[in-house]
Amino acid sequence: MLPWLITMGLLIAGAFGLLPADIVWPLFGVALVAAIIDALWTIRQVRRTSAIMGTAALIGKEAIARTELAPEGYVFIAGERWRARLESGAAAIGDHVRITGAEGYQLRVEKL
């Protein structure tokens, strides 16, 4: 973002004669190259990032039991209430559980 602001500032300074042309245009060229490199770097970073959505994004995260899990009930994670099945034992309201998998829209959890 900063290279783009510098580039635009130099362009405006050159257009209105605020700085001598022999200083503005070389600096403008350098700033423009920096801005292009910045844009290409950002595009590269975005393309390398994979978007994980749905239940796959929840696996390995910690949730809080909102109802008793004996073995089924509801958990709260990321601002959402999900139906869950405890793999073994039971969990009381407020217990922390870890999501280990999913079957459709039902999460498989284990007590921490």
Image (cartoon, grey):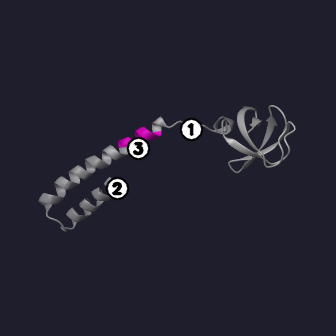
**Where does residue 104 sit, x and y in percent of width and height?**
76, 33
The magenta-colored residue range is: 40-46
**Quarter location, residue 42:** top left
Q: Is residue 42 left or right of residue 95?
A: left
Q: Residue at x 26, y 63 (%)?
A: 12
User: Would you say the magenta stretch is mainly helix, strand or loop?
Assistant: helix
Q: Residue at x 22, y 54 (%)?
A: 28
**Quarter location, residue 21:** bottom left
Of the two numbered discs 2 and 1 on the same chain, state the one appearing first in sequence. Answer: 2
Residue ranking furthest to the right: 70
Of the two numbered discs 3 and 1 on the same chain, state the one appearing first in sequence. Answer: 3
Q: Given the image, on which type of amino acid does mark 1 rest?
A: Ala
Helix, strand or loop at label 1? It is loop
- Residue 42 belongs to the span the image colors magenta: yes
Q: Given the image, on which type of amino acid does mark 3 rest?
A: Thr
**Where does residue 73 sit, x and y in percent of width and height?**
84, 42
Of the two numbered discs 2 and 3 on the same chain, state the one appearing first in sequence. Answer: 2
Q: Which residue is mark 3?
A: 42
CB of mark 2 within 8 Å of CB of mark 3? Answer: no
Q: Which residue is mark 1?
A: 51
Q: Which residue is mark 2?
A: 2
